[in-house]
């Protein structure tokens, strides 16, 4: 939940876009159900499943949009990495793992969201000129994998909720109502009218 708050603080538009995308996914949810049972009616459980699905999708989609915005700002992070590294090392001087960890900690203090994506102890064998680009590439790679996982979660939620929603449908409500109407119409047309004459015309069988 702390990550969601940081994403919203980083860009409030991530929440707005996340909700809009979630609504689009809900349309897919309804399409799956109505495509399976065209004449079925939604029940209270169907609406409950839809509400839970909307909340889950809103969370996941907000994370996706926020992650995309972070990828778009990786050049800014790379410039910050370079400024910190170049203030201590010359261009082709190798940066130790411990020094790289210090750079990461400074970057996290400046950009708290980075705490969720990069950590210390993973950058070694880079010189001062290579390290900032390596850090930015690692961040981009992590974000792409993170977005892919979020998309798979969204797809899984839609499929599970779609199957559960189909099981909660009132599949016979409309068909039963139509059948009852047709029966009543047939019965009403077959019964004689009240007060009407049921006397059959007499046939004259008298021989002349």
Image: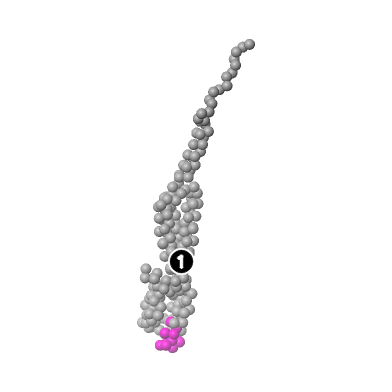
Q: Does residue 143 appear to the left or right of 200 in the view shown?
A: left
Measured as percent of width and height from the top left, residue 184 is found at: 49, 36
Comparing 198 with 205, the one in front is: 198
Residue at left offset 51%, top offset 34%: 188
Measured as percent of width and height from the top left, residue 24 is found at: 49, 61
Q: Does residue 1 appear in the picture of this structure?
A: yes
**Residue 205 quadrant:** top right
In this picture, is 1 found above or below 129? above
Q: Does residue 63 appear to the left or right of 196 in the view shown?
A: left
Comparing 111 with 172, the one in front is: 172
Q: Identify the residue under disc 1.
A: 18
Residue 88 painted magenta? yes
Pick out the residue farthest to the top. 208
Identify the magenta region.
81-93
Residue at left offset 52%, top offset 30%: 193
Residue 2 painted magenta? no
In this picture, is 152 found above or below 170? below
Measured as percent of width and height from the top left, residue 58 is found at: 43, 64
Picture quarter with the C terminus = top right
**Residue 87 quadrant:** bottom left
Comparing 162 with 186, the one in front is: 186
Comparing 127 with 107, the one in front is: 107
Residue at left offset 53%, top offset 33%: 189
Picture quarter with the N terminus = bottom left
Question: How busy is the neighbourhood of tag 1: few (under 14 within 10 Å), some, or many (20 plus)?
Answer: many
What secondary structure is marked by label 1? helix
Residue at left offset 40%, top offset 59%: 52
Which of the colour schemes (rainbow, by chain, secondary structure, one colour) is used? Answer: one colour
Pick out the residue farthest to the right. 208
Q: Does residue 140 appear in the picture of this structure?
A: no
Measured as percent of width and height from the top left, residue 136 is found at: 45, 77
């Amino acid at each position: 939940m702390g990550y969601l708050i940081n994403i919203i603080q980083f860009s409030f538009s991530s929440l707005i876009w996340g909700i809009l995308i979630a609504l689009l996914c809900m349309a897919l949810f309804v399409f799956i159900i109505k495509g399976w049972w065209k004449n079925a009616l939604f029940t209270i459980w169907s609406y409950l499943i839809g509400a839970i699905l909307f909340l889950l999708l809103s969370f996941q989609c907000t994370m996706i949009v926020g992650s995309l915005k972070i990828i778009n700002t990786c050049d800014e992070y790379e410039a910050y990495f370079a400024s910190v590294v170049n203030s201590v090392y010359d261009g082709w001087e190798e940066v130790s793992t411990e020094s790289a960890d210090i750079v990461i900690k400074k970057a996290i203090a400046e950009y708290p969201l980075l705490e969720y994506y990069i950590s210390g102890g993973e950058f070694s064998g880079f010189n001062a000129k290579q390290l900032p680009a390596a850090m930015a590439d690692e961040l981009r790679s992590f974000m792409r994998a993170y977005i892919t996982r979020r998309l798979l979660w969204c797809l899984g939620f839609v499929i599970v909720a779609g199957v559960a929603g189909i099981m909660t449908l009132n599949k016979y409500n409309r068909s039963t109502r139509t059948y009852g109407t047709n029966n009543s119409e047939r019965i009403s047309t077959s019964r004689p009218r009240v007060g009407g004459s049921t006397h059959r015309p007499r046939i004259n069988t008298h021989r002349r």
